Structures are given as C-alpha cells and as structure tokens.
Amino acid sequence: MSGHNKWSTIKRKKGALDSKRSKIFSKIIKDITVAVKEGGNDPDGNARLRLAIANAKGVNMPKDTLQRAINKAADKNTAALTELTFECYAQHGVAVFVECLTDNNNRTVSTVRSILNKYGGNLGTNGSLNFIFSRKGVFSIPIENNNPEELEMTLIDAGAEEIEQDEGYLTAYCQMEDFSSMQKVLEQSGIEAQSAELQRIPNTMVSVELESAKKILKMINLLEEDDDVQAVYHNMEMTDEMMEDE
C-alpha cells in the first residue's frame, strides 16, 4: 500500500489547517445525526455514535456543540439523512469516489453532476470503481504521550495490516471487517485516535502532469466544499508540487 503516507498526510493537514472549521464540524454533525437515527443517542450502546463523538473530540469540537448535535439528532422532527455515493472519472482516467449525506437526493445528484461536467468528468455506474479502491479502517494516532514501540505492538495485535509514521503521528490501516475490533482495543487501552474512519484507499495510482492535475484538484476541492459531500477519494499520484498547492 505504498503512497498511503502521503495521502494521509494531506488529509490530516487539510483538516488541521482548514480555515472553514465549521465545514469540518458540519460533516461530523451529519455523522452524529445518522448514528443517532440508526441506533439511538446512548453512545454506550451505539458504536457508530461513539466513533462520531471520538472524531468530534479529535478536531476539538466544543462539548456544548457536540451535545446540541446529539440532542437535535434525537429529535423526531429532525430530518433523516440519506447516504449517497458517486463513482466518477475525472480527465486523464483519474478515478474519483464521492461520499455524501443528504436530505435532498435530487439536489445532491444535480450538484455533483454539474461540478463533474464543468471539469470534464463523468459519472460511472455503481461498482465500476470496486477494483480501484479498497475500503480500509484508518486510525490516525498522535505519538505524543504514547510509546511508539508499544503503540505499534498494540495496533498490530489489534489487527493493523500496515503502520506508517509521519510528523508525530502513527497511521494504522486494517481490513474493514476488523475496524470495530481495532476501535475497541484502542478504547480498552486508553489510546485516543485523532481520527478513526473507514476510507477508500486506491489500489492503483494514475500519474498526471502538473497543469492537468491542478484542474482535477480544483474539481475535487469544489466537490469537497459542497455541504452534502462528506468525503472525496481519488487515485491521482500526488507530487510535492501538488501538495504545496494544496
């Protein structure tokens, strides 16, 4: 799974440096809404809610904001959200996977299609990117206050397939089926991840020259900025120049 480190670093830096912090909070609040609607507002009996709460703490969401989100999600008048995914291709054969949570499917489909059309992308059929992306559990854990060697051994015992170290963080990858057990082991060991989520990791990468890549990144950024979009994954090889622009 070479190249994951760069992908994870970009994702973490974007989260840490994003001036639109309300956008980050909005995504987590949507996760909380879905979790509460599915399994109730008691985190002890709702693993998805526990995960959303942990991720909220990882981005320093204020406690009162977090509690308001849980209370609002429990209100029967709060609209349920639908999970939508879009499997797309940008120019130069770059695969793009878009995950959304929405209260209006037509609006979301229209917005995603409009952004793709503007930048020469197109929608694929469901399942068309299955061979390009694998769904993995990804845990980003600060090394600070942890013994790196002991932390690594704990992660391996918990089912981590691969562990990478970069800029004060350990990033652990596991099979999707092992995600819950990894989460449970970390909780029992008192290890707090900055983020823990299922991501779509590219199995194959596409190399694109810089100017074309910048246009594709503009499209990806527009998708990410949309209120209905939770995550965008792609398989474009990221160079240092591209990362500087990011």
Image (cartoon, rainbow, N blue to C red):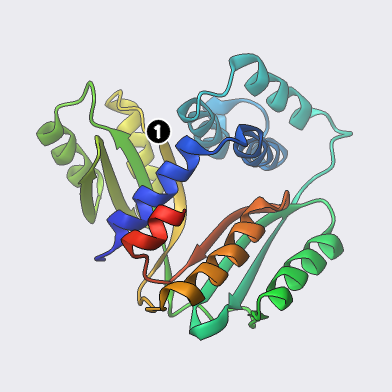
In the picture of the structure, the residue carrying the numbered disc 1 is 194
Residue 1, placed above or below residue 37: below
Q: Describe the element under mark 1 as helix, strand or loop.
A: loop
The residue located at (43%, 71%) in the rendering is 235
The spot of residue 1 in percent (x, y) is: 26, 66
Which of the 4 image quadrants contains residue 194? Answer: top left
> Which three-letter amino acid code belongs to the residue tagged 1?
Gln
| Number of numbered discs visible in the structure rendering | 1
Q: Is residue 218 visible?
A: yes
The residue located at (31%, 59%) in the rendering is 4
Residue 105, placed above or below residue 88: above
Q: Horizontally, is 16 left or right of 174 in the view?
A: right
The spot of residue 65 in percent (x, y) is: 67, 20
The spot of residue 9 in percent (x, y) is: 35, 48
Q: Is residue 177 visible?
A: no
Farthest-out residue, front? 211
Which of the 4 image quadrants contains residue 238? Answer: bottom left
Residue 58, placed above or below residue 27: above
